[in-house]
Amino acid sequence: MSRSFVTHLECGYSGERYDAGIVQTVSAAGKPLLVRYDLGAIARAVDRDAISARSGGFWRFRELLPLADRRHELHLGEVTTPLVRLARSEPRGGALFVKDESRLPTGSFKARGVGIAVAKAKELGIGHIAMPTNGNAGAALAAYAARAGIRATVFCPADTPDVNVREIAAQGAAVYRVPGLIDECGRIVGEGKKALGWFDLSTLKEPYRIEGKKTMGLELAEQFDWRLPEAIFYPTGGGTGLIGMWKAFAELAALGWATGPLPRLFAIQASGCAPIVRAFERGERHAEAWRDAQTIAAGIRVPAALGDFLILDAVRESAGAALAVDDAAIVAAQQRVAHDEGLLLCPEGAATFAGWQLARKRGLVAADARVVLFNCATALKYPLPEAAATFARGDSFERLRSR
Ligand SMILES: *Cc1c(COP(=O)(O)O)cnc(C)c1O
């Protein structure tokens, strides 16, 4: 048993208060709801070292999470994801790390947000969840819903790789391909929830996925001994992680647990789908939907984000930037890091490396900065370059001499 330190929910746009004790979706203004805590009571109840001494991945931060009863936690072997240093790539005097989120259940950081949100849905008595997905969120939903004994229905864009669709189905969810992109899948979930009473777990259309993604910021603070790094590069789709980490840093500062300046946040998008970058460059607070979105980095192929203003606020308040990189730069970054460092990044993760290179070139990050890139999913769920050479007994070894 435990207690919840949640005081209320708050519209991220208007600040209007909502009851956290009942099922909530978005605010009356149609904007994301943020979870607020009694931080003073948390500071009196627990200290950061006690949390660090616990095991159990993101569930360790339970005082800063929304569950009222620990019995609703859903465990699939969550780990604190490692910071892998890229010593061959970093500039002299600097430190470049990848936070490798591929080690989480279902192979992506979607496990954080979806794990917490499904557990909270279970606590609130929800029986059937639906979601649009580019793949990874649906896989996490299928797994955690199976764990919770909740039904799950998932809609993917028609061109979602087979491996993602099969993974979702294998974990017991009903999964459908939809002609169109993620926004079309979202429309279908919206209509289905009216027709069939599903609970919609779409990005930022319920309050709790942000809380799960927030744990990336909490873990980072802990891993850097509570002195946050100077810059974070985050592959930005719906922006849950960026918004969540910025919220985490504010909570850590209020608790007095993190000291020193806050990190600068760099939102990285693909140049074939860069609505946040366009709005950032134009000085706007909301991002117009991107037309004909196209990129190999499917996780950030998100033409319109409900939390656009929260992403843009966080990037600007942190003195960061929003930057776009093209697919060729993503592929080059993926190959370079795999060859030089032995770490295979997913395309979205590789985009952050390319984004960091661009930021260095533009003089936006100092050589001696401690920088964190996010590898958000396992590369093994994506098509990899062809490797079809054969070698049979009896073939000449001469041609292998230089390989
Ligand atoms: C969902 C996803 C993203 C984008 O994350 P947001 O926090 O929603 O912006 C990036 N990369 C991968 C692999 C994803 O699955």
Image (cartoon, rainbow, N blue to C red):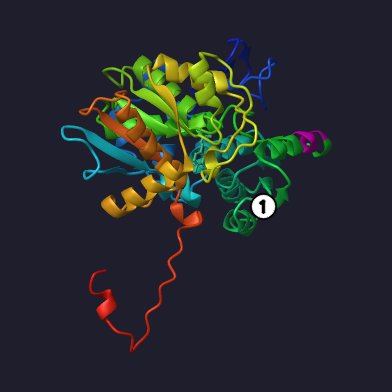
Eyeballing the image, is 204 above or below 27?
below
Q: Point out the residue furthest to the left here.
A: 93
Give the mark count. Answer: 1
Q: Is residue 377 left or right of residue 125?
A: left
Q: Is residue 261 magenta?
A: no
Query: How far across and how far down the image is residue 279, in percent?
Result: 54, 20
Residue pictured at 34% horizontal, 28% vertical: 359
Look at the picture and state if 153 lies above or below 162: above
Give the extent of the magenta segment.
190-194
Q: Residue at x 36, y 37 (%)?
A: 373
Image location of residue 334, percent across then percent down: 38, 48
Image quadrant in which the C terminus is located: bottom left
Query: How many neighbours does mark 1 have within 10 angstroms: few (below 14), some (14-19), or many (20 or more)?
Result: many
Instruction: Give the SS element for disc 1.
Output: loop
Q: Which quadrant would residue 33 be assigned to in this image?
A: top right
Q: Residue at the far front: name it.
A: 399
- The overriding secondary structure of the stretch rendered in magenta is helix
Q: Residue furthest bottom?
A: 394
Front residue of 393/254: it is 393
In the rendered view, would you say 355 is above or below 346?
above
- Which of the 4 image quarters holds residue 301? top right
The answer to whether any part of residue 354 appears in the image is yes
Q: Which residue was labeled with disc 1? A: 173
In this view, the residue in front, 152 or 6, is: 152
Residue at 33 percent of width and 41 percent of height: 98
Please tell me which residue lies in front, 211 or 367: 367
Return the x and y of residue 15 as percentages of the image width and height.
58, 10
- Residue type, mark 1 in image: Ala
Residue that appears at 42% across and 48% down: 331
